[in-house]
Every structure is written in structure tokens, then in C-alpha cells.
Image: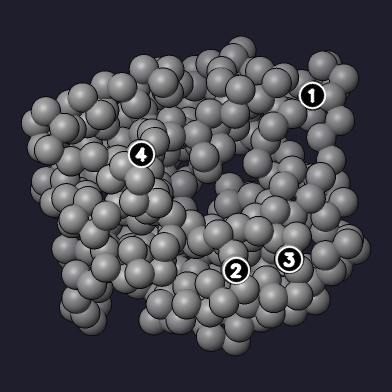
């Protein structure tokens, strides 16, 4: 049941990897939050952290392969890795486009273990010219706090305000601030275009904050969100909804065809979701950043599984929002 490979065979689709344009690095599972929908199972109690040797090896891969144009840094809250600043400043030297998956509240909360301040982040991001992609599942306070916890919405707004003051989201600044919407419940996101319009109008009218683009992302039926669905008896209903909304155009554009995901311990996966399910890239031997082979990895067979219906339902879902 819910066999993704059967579905793509039904549509006579071939979905091999095409290139490696993006190296996505999950540099820690530690986070200052523990959101209900988190497919990474991040929380303040997690201790997994990418060490400097692994980061240096990723940087070496980036230097050696100009074909890899983007570095997508995620977590957890990636800012909690002690080598976060080092990774960004060194990756900039290789002329890469750097994306940081930022949860907004870490700026105000700081490190939950060391209590180190992160108030410097907006200015640091601006100085390095990185693109910021921030979690804000809804423009309504009640919906955000249902998913992410009490007090999160107001902290998020204050953090966006600080980013605006640093130039992010401001016309002609060149500093990109994008927000991420994901549904609060077991349903697909609405139209990304319509949601962006509503977000911009509501956030400006009520809070005087700005951003560039909204990315609508489908909740993936793995880990915490899957457990939430199962507790409510909604897992099969949600999976049927995803499968019935399968979109072959979205399948052709899935992000795993042009990216690789690196775990905190240096192992390589087709995507962040496979990483969280411990489904490594299909090769003759386990692949890490320490035996990285660009030619082999840029034309390998991608491993698909049930959760892939989340990326191909409706308009599709990727780390940059809808696909088709």
C-alpha cells in the first residue's frame, strides 16, 4: 500500500539523479524548540553535532566542485553548532550561494545549554549576504503556537523585525528573507501565491514587517508528525490524501534529483527526509563526505519510499516551496 515506485511506474516516469547543484548540510539536531510537526525530531535535549573535521571535508568538496553552486545549512537550529559562523565564512570564499534554514526564535532565545547570546545573527547574516529561509507556519498567532509552542509567534515577529532592520526583506537590498508555511493539520497547503499575498498583507498591517517570498511546504508523514497522525487515527487518511493528489509534473521536479543531504556525522543521503529515516544513498558501499565521488553521486539511482508522496502531492513540495 502507498507504493511510490509503483506510482511512478504507472506514469512511466524515470527519475534518476541529474546533477548536484546543492549540498544540504544538517549540522546539528539540537534546537531551542521542539515543534509538533518536526520531521527531524529536534529539541533542546538533542546533542548530535557536526564536528569541525566533517565541516572541513564538506568545505573541501565545495572548493573542488564548482558545479555545486548552493550550500543549504539546516538543523535543528544550525546556529547552535559552534562552527556555524566558520562554515559560512569559509563557504563564502568558494563563492557559493549560502542558504540558512533559520527558525527565527533562536536569535532571541540563544543557546538553551550554554545560554550564549545569538542577538548578533541578523547583522552577521547581512554581512555574509546569506539567504535566510525562516519557519513561520501561519500569520495567525494561535495557529503558530498550536504547532510550535507558547510565545513563539511574538518572538518570530520580533526576529523578523530585526532582520528587516539589517536590510532583509527590504526592496533592492539584495538580502533575501523568505518565510515557510506548512499546514497546522493533516491537509495539503493552499495556493502558495494566495498564501503569500495574505501573509504579506497581514504581517505588514498588524506588525509592520516584510519578507520576500513565501514557500508552502507539505508536512512529511515521518517522525513527530507521523506519530501525531497515528495518535489521532489520521495516518492512513493523510497518506491516501497525498497519494490521490500525486502530480507527475511535481515528481519530475523533485529536489532530490539535483541535491545531496549530509548528516551531522558526514553520511550522505538523497534528501533530508531519507536522512531522518536512515535511508542512505544507494551505492556499492556506505558513502560519506570522506569518500565523496562527484561523478558517481551525480548519476546514481535515487531511493524512493512512502514519504515521497509528500513531495509530489498537489503542486508539489520542496525546500523552496511548490514545484509545479
Q: Which residue is mark 3?
A: 66
In primary-sequence order, the first of circles 4 and 2 is 2
Q: Which residue is mark 2?
A: 95
Q: CA distance from mark 4 to mark 3?
A: 27 Å
> Marks 1 and 4: in contact by CB < 8 Å?
no
In primary-sequence order, the first of circles 4 and 3 is 3
Seen from the viewer's position, the closer of residues 153 and 113 is 153
Q: Position of residue 246 (x, y in %)?
A: 64, 18
Q: What's the residue at 81%, 35% (across, down)?
A: 15
Q: Which residue is mark 4?
A: 212
In primary-sequence order, the first of circles 2 and 3 is 3
Does dot 1 land on a helix, a strand or a loop? Answer: helix
> Marks 3 and 2: in contact by CB < 8 Å?
no
Question: Is residue 136 left or right of 188 when viewed as pictured?
Answer: left
Seen from the viewer's position, the closer of residues 281 and 322 is 322
Q: CA distance from mark 3 to mark 1?
A: 32 Å
Q: Nearer the viewer, mark 4 or mark 1?
A: 4
In primary-sequence order, the first of circles 1 and 2 is 1
**Relative to 274, does residue 53 appear above or below in the rendering?**
below
Point out which mark residue 262 bears: none
Q: Which residue is mark 1?
A: 8
Question: Is residue 261 left or right of 227 when viewed as pictured?
Answer: right
Q: Residues within 10 Å of mark 4 (few under 14, many from 20)?
A: some
> Marks 2 and 1: in contact by CB < 8 Å?
no
The extreme bottom residue here reads 53
The extreme front residue here reads 172
Colour pattern: one colour
In primary-sequence order, the first of circles 4 and 1 is 1
Amino acid at each position: 500500500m502507498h507504493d511510490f515506485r509503483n506510482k511512478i511506474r504507472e506514469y512511466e516516469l524515470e527519475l534518476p539523479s541529474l546533477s548536484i547543484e546543492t549540498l544540504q548540510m544538517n549540522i546539528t539536531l539540537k534546537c531551542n524548540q521542539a515543534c509538533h510537526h518536526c520531521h527531524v525530531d529536534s529539541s533542546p535535549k538533542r546533542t548530535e553535532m557536526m564536528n569541525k573535521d566533517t565541516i572541513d571535508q564538506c568545505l573541501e568538496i565545495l572548493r573542488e566542485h564548482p558545479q555545486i553552486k548552493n550550500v543549504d545549512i539546516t538543523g535543528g537550529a544550525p546556529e547552535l553548532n559552534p562552527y556555524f559562523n566558520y562554515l559560512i565564512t569559509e563557504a563564502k570564499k568558494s563563492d557559493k550561494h549560502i542558504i540558512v534554514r533559520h527558525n527565527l526564535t533562536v536569535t532571541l532565545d540563544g543557546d538553551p545549554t550554554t545560554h550564549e547570546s545569538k542577538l548578533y545573527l541578523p547583522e552577521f547574516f547581512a554581512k555574509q549576504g546569506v539567504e535566510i529561509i525562516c519557519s513561520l507556519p501561519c500569520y495567525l498567532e494561535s495557529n503558530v503556537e498550536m504547532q510550535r509552542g507558547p510565545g513563539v509567534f511574538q518572538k518570530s515577529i520580533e526576529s523578523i523585525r530585526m532582520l528587516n532592520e539589517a536590510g532583509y526583506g527590504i526592496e533592492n537590498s539584495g538580502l533575501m528573507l523568505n518565510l515557510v508555511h506548512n499546514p497546522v493539520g493533516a491537509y495539503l497547503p493552499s495556493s502558495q501565491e494566495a498564501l503569500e499575498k495574505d501573509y504579506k498583507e497581514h504581517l505588514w498591517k498588524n506588525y509592520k514587517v516584510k519578507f520576500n517570498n513565501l514557500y508552502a511546504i507539505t508536512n512529511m508523514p515521518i517522525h513527530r508528525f507521523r506519530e501525531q497522525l497515528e495518535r489521532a487515527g489520521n495516518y492512513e487518511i493523510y497518506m491516501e490524501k497525498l497519494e490521490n493528489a500525486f502530480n507527475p509534473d511535481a515528481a519530475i521536479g523533485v529536489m532530490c534529483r539535483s541535491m545531496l543531504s549530509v548528516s551531522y556525522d558526514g553520511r550522505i543521503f538523497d534528501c533530508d527526509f531519507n536522512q531522518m529515516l536512515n535511508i542512505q544513498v544507494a551505492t556499492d558501499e556506505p558513502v560519506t563526505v570522506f569518500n565523496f565521488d562527484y561523478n558517481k553521486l551525480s548519476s546514481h539511482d535515487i531511493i524512493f519510499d512512502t514519504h515521497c508522496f509528500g513531495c509530489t502531492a498537489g503542486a508539489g513540495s520542496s525546500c523552496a516551496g511548490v514545484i509545479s
